[in-house]
Image: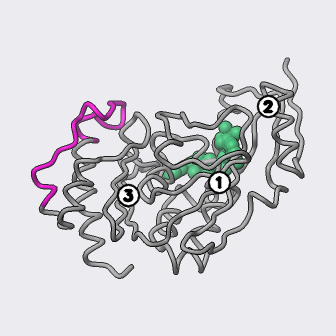
């Protein structure tokens, strides 16, 4: 039987060194995905590297026109943060809608985007806002970071430190929930700034993606009516036991229209 070691890193450099020494090591954030995968024998790391004690991965602060959110910030702490609620309320609402209170209390922003579940909520908000992903060695745009289903630009020995979110755009995220988990059967994030609109879709099955045709139409005229002539191709979606590709693609259109309406009818 294989053994499992556990270490708590007190320096980012130690976490990186341990990842290099032990190819089967895994970083442990909130454990909400990783521990479930281990229980189901889908993952069998030889070493768990706990990130809780790393100060670089903690904290939420305003940094000029940007909001810094440490990778180890939990969904619950982001949802409850007065700073996020005031400066990027759409992000706080997104966090508040993830899973249930227990998962929100443990699950982290960094764990969610490193995992890049194709039905997760954070990737849509991060991509729509055009956030910057900061790791121990570089900064990446959200467009470069997400690379498909459970796939990111992170190297096996790379540690995500946190994200920088621009605070200028307003964000509305809507999802049609898978009722048991609250993961997105389809979820749409619409971010509107002075220089244009970005639309990111999660839940289609192949990883988070942008809907550039909707972005162009909405950047020209921010009105749900401009989406009337647009449909998302079902080829961009997948079919599983929960929904067909055609249904998911249809939901993407409906949710985008509703998110635009929310922008037009709600206060920030
Ligand atoms: C019942 C249930 C319902 C859920 N519903 C939703 C939902 O509605 N919407 C949603 O978006 N999510 C949902 N989730 C997922 C939840 O948000 C998880 O918290 C998240 O996917 C993983 O975060 P974590 O901190 O627990 O990461 P972990 O499970 O600890 O780690 C996940 C992966 O990320 C890697 N990792 C973690 N931190 C870092 C880092 N700093 N640098 C590099 N790699 C890192 C780990 O090595 C691991 O491979 C749900 C989960 C459960 C159990």
Q: Which residues are magenta?
A: 226-248
Q: Nearer the viewer, residue 201 or 245?
A: 201
Q: Is residue 171 left or right of residue 39?
A: left
Identify the residue at image location x=48%, y=33%.
149
Identify the residue at image location x=70%, y=57%.
72
Q: How is the image coloured?
A: one colour
Q: Give the residue number, with chain letter if any, for mark 1.
A: 107
Q: CA distance from mark 1 to mark 3?
A: 20 Å
SS class of the residue under badge 3?
A: strand
Mark 1: C-beta under 8 Å from nearest atom of ligand 1: yes
Which image quadrant is residue 13 in? top right
Q: Nearer the viewer, residue 189 or 93?
A: 189
SS class of the residue under badge 2?
A: strand
Q: Give the residue number, with chain letter if any, for mark 3.
A: 189
Magenta includes 238?
yes
SS class of the residue under badge 1?
A: loop
Q: Give the residue number, with chain letter if any, for mark 2.
A: 25
Q: Residues within 10 Å of mark 3 (few under 14, many from 20)?
A: many
Q: Is residue 206 left or right of residue 84?
A: left
Q: Nearer the viewer, mark 1 or mark 2?
A: 2
Can residue 31 be seen in this snapshot? no
Q: Nearer the viewer, mark 1 or mark 3?
A: 3
Which label's residue is closer to the chain start, 2 or 3? 2
Q: Position of residue 262 (x, y in %)?
A: 29, 71
Q: CA distance from mark 1 to mark 2?
A: 19 Å
Is 266 drawn above or below residue 78 in the view shown?
below
How would you classify the magenta stretch by its main secondary structure? loop
Q: Is residue 222 left or right of residue 193?
A: left
Identify the residue at image location x=65%, y=26%.
42
């Amino acid at each position: 039987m294989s053994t499992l070691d556990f270490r708590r890193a007190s320096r980012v450099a130690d976490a990186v060194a341990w990842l290099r020494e032990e190819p089967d090591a895994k970083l442990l954030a909130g454990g909400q995905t990783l521990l479930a995968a281990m229980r189901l024998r889908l993952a069998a790391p030889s070493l768990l590297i706990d990130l809780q004690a790393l100060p670089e991965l903690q904290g939420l602060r305003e940094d000029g026109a940007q909001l810094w959110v440490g990778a180890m910030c939990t969904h619950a702490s982001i949802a409850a943060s007065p700073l996020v609620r005031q400066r990027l309320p759409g992000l706080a609402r997104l966090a508040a809608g993830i899973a249930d209170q227990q998962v929100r209390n443990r699950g982290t922003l960094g764990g969610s985007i490193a995992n890049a579940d194709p039905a997760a909520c954070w990737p849509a908000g991060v991509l729509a806002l055009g956030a910057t992903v900061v790791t121990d060695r570089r900064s990446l745009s959200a467009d470069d970071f997400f690379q498909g289903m459970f796939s990111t630009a992170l190297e096996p020995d790379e540690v995500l430190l946190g994200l920088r979110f621009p605070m200028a755009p307003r964000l509305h995220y809507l999802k049609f929930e898978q009722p048991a988990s609250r993961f997105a059967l389809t979820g749409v994030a619409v971010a509107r700034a002075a220089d244009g609109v970005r639309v990111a879709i999660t839940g289609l099955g192949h990883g988070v993606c942008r809907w550039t045709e909707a972005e162009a139409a909405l950047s020209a005229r921010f009105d749900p009516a401009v989406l009337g002539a647009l449909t998302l191709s079902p080829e961009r979606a997948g079919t599983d036991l929960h929904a067909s590709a055609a249904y998911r693609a249809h939901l993407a259109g409906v949710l985008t229209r509703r998110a635009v309406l929310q922008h037009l009818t709600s206060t920030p």
